[in-house]
Amino acid sequence: MDLLGEQVDNSWKDKHLNLLAGSEGVKGTDDSVESGGKTRGYGITVIPEALESVADSLSDKELATRIIDYNHNRLRAMGIDFDNLPEAMKINASDLMYNTGTLFNNYRTALDAKDFPTALRESLDVVSATDPDQNMDLKVVRGLVNRRMQMYNEAADALGLSEISDNKVFKSQTEGALTDVVYNFEGDKEPIIFNIDKGMHTKSISDERPEGYDIRKPLVSSPLNDIMEMNDPDYEEYGYDLTPIVPDGTPSYMNLLGE
């Protein structure tokens, strides 16, 4: 029930809570990615000041529910027409608030304009967290890239938009950037690419990825692959011309055979 006595459908909160249970887990950890310290279940790392006095008396699920409620009220207080958003965008905005404590300007502008495809796109580069092993600097976290993709697809499915098929995180070749986050789609739809001026978080470094990055597909691997992959998008992107240079007057293979 809202302040005017009108019935409000809050079933989206249960759906958001279930998504948090799936992506963050219902049990806490002693070594969270975002803070490097303890976290409670449902990915709770920061407890709003207004809930600190009751947090210890609540279960993780109860506290997560209270945080979602708290952020819901904050979103309405910010002037966002929140209750008239599609359920999918309520969950998406709520998740950003839950994860970061704020809505970034480009996302907020698109949300206010009801430009939901743009808002969802703007949510995809919220992928960094402080790294205790790197002077508490913000670094790109692969787990957050996956979470953004998951939340994007949850909304895209409900809104009839194309879903992301997979993502890649590369060492950037763009001047001024350190990391490229690439979200791919099936078919001919262009990928969404963010050139980010932050390196990789320590938590995203592993034996498989010693620098945290995926390996870019090599442009040239063998003469046979060069022939077979002339239509590969990588060749188009970098402008490779694989047509052999033949001097004028060189007889053709067919002429050599007498044909």
Image (cartoon, helix red, strand yellow):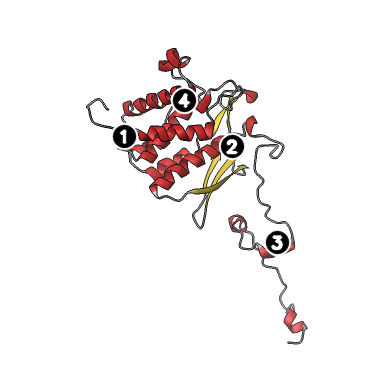
Element on which disc 1 rests: loop
Of tags 2 and 4, the one toward the viewer is: 4
Q: Position of residue 202 (x, y in %)?
A: 65, 30
Give the spatial CA distance, label 4 vs label 1.
20 Å
Is residue 139 positioned above or below 167 on the image?
Answer: above
Label 2 crowd (10 A; few <14 / some 14-19 / many >=20): many
Q: Position of residue 196 (x, y in %)?
A: 55, 38
User: Label 1: which residue?
Assistant: 9
Of tags 3 and 2, the one toward the viewer is: 2
Q: Quadrant of the C terminus?
A: bottom right
User: Label 2: which residue?
Assistant: 142
Q: Position of residue 145 (x, y in %)?
A: 55, 38
Query: Looking at numbered disc 3 in the image, what kind of residue is underneath it?
Result: Asn
Query: Looking at numbered disc 1 in the image, what kind of residue is underneath it?
Result: Asp
Give the spatial CA distance, label 2 vs label 4.
25 Å
* Residue found at x 33% / y 40%: 113
Q: Nearer the viewer, residue 166 or 109?
A: 166
User: Label 3: which residue?
Assistant: 225
Label 4 crowd (10 A; few <14 / some 14-19 / many >=20): some
Q: Nearer the viewer, residue 14 or 238?
A: 14
Ranked by sequence position, the earlier of labels 4 and 3 is: 4
Q: In the rendered image, which quarter is residue 71 located in? A: top left
User: Label 4: which residue?
Assistant: 61
Element on which disc 4 rests: helix
Q: Position of residue 5 (x, y in %)?
A: 22, 27
Q: Which mark is residue 164?
A: none
Give the spatial CA distance, label 3 vs label 2.
31 Å
Query: Looking at numbered disc 4 in the image, what kind of residue is underneath it?
Result: Lys
